[in-house]
Image: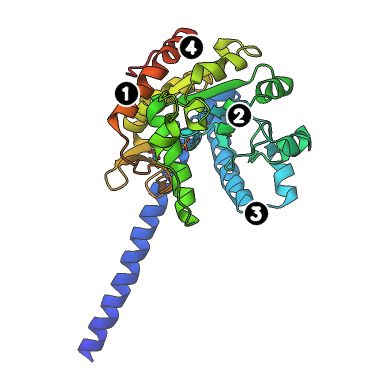
Amino acid sequence: MLFKQQVLLRQKLFVLGSLAIGSLLYLVARVGSLDRLQPLCPIDGRFGPRGQDEIQLRALQFKRGLLHEFRKGNASKEQIRLHNLVQQLPKAIIIGVRKGGTRALLEMLNLHPAVVKASQEIHFFDNDENYAKGIEWYRKKMPFSYPHQITIEKSPAYFITEEVPERIYKMNSSIKLLIIVREPTTRAISDYTQVLEGKERKNKTYYKFEKLAIDPNTCEVNTKYKAVRTSIYTKHLERWLKYFPVEQFHIVDGDRLITEPLPELQLVEKFLNLPPRISQYNLYFNATRGFYCLRFNIVFNKCLAGSKGRIHPEVDTSVITKLRKFFHPFNQKFYQITGRTFNWP
Ligand code: A3P
């Protein structure tokens, strides 16, 4: 009998303990999301004196929850209308460069409470079929957001596609353009690695990087190879500069985004005229992944998918040297145009 009572008591204590821990975790998580809401206030400067702010904050917290519900497909049309949720054209686009760290940049910017990312690459401006569907089609592809937030999308193919600058200019001539670059030879090898993995998945064989990057007839760098051409950043940028002034571009150092993301993100916040809200708290190094991961609050965190951060194949050092020598003059020009210098060899 005594034993039975002891078991019951232990069970009760366990339930109570679990409830207490659960509530504590919930509260901490709530504080985390409130942290993300506070920065919204100064952005549009629409909050009044103190007491009023508190009501607004609570309303915003509710709205964030609603936005989340909508993303999951649970919010009704009436709720969307009631809370002024809108699908906005992007105010900034990450136009490239492929394998520069475009996904990491988008996900990290999305930590900012005033930024809403378009999760998918939309390929509106580089794909003729999509472009023919018109700007309303593009807008409808955008996520729901509050009017004071900005939408950002990324489609790295935009940077290298001939028609894109003019098409984006026609949509919004004052749009902000983000380009994330890495040391050109490393980027080209990363590009190759992605294609190689695709081939291997389909059980296909593929050439070695050396064979594609160097023309076997001339022994010179093969400029017909796409992975090489994409890394000639200045050539592509020059096409964009026919439509947009250089001040409308911000160059992100993709190599530094890997090792030290915060300062790079702070530069982007400044460029986008956003108050600095992304902090070291939001970024933590995950030794298993070998990369920084994202922390939204004490409960919600995430690392990028395994397809980001592949192991590159070993490449002949003479080929690397040849490529670096080839890219050197283009890099110098790129530094000169953009006003951002990198320590690329
Ligand atoms: P590698 O796979 O060559 O390492 P993109 O998103 O434009 O395709 O770029 C992919 C690259 O983003 C990866 O290239 C990886 O190095 C880089 N990257 C930068 N920050 C990262 C992060 N926090 N997690 C994973 N990959 C990151």
Q: Amino acid at mark 4?
A: Thr
Q: Is residue 265 visible?
A: yes
Residue 338, numbered circle: 4
Q: Earlier in the sequence, mark 4 or mark 3?
A: 3
Q: Earlier in the sequence, mark 4 or mark 2?
A: 2
Q: Quadrant of ligand 1?
A: top left
Q: Amino acid at mark 3?
A: Gly
Q: Farthest residue to the front: give it.
A: 217
Residue 154 vertical placement versus 184 (above, below): below
Query: Are the residues flagged by discs 3 and 1 in contact, CB closer than 8 Å?
Result: no
Question: Which mark lies nearer to you, 4 or 1?
Answer: 1
Q: Earlier in the sequence, mark 3 or mark 1?
A: 3
Q: For mark 3, does the 10 Å Cα neighbourhood hold few (<14), some (14 to 19), or many (20 or more) residues?
A: few
| Circle 1 SS class | helix
Residue 310 vertical placement versus 126 (above, below): below
Tell whether circle 3 marks a residue whose Cβ is less than 8 angstroms from ligand 1: no
How far is the residue under mark 1 from the one under mark 2?
A: 29 Å
Residue 73, numbered circle: 3
- Left or right of 296? Residue 169 is right
Q: Which residue is mark 1?
A: 321
How far is the residue under mark 2 from the one under mark 3?
A: 29 Å
Question: Which mark lies nearer to you, 3 or 1?
Answer: 1
Tell whether circle 4 marks a residue whose Cβ is less than 8 angstroms from ligand 1: no
Coordinates of residue 19 in the picture (x, y in percent)? 37, 64
Q: Quadrant of residue 177?
A: top right
Q: Residue at x 45, y 46 (%)?
A: 206
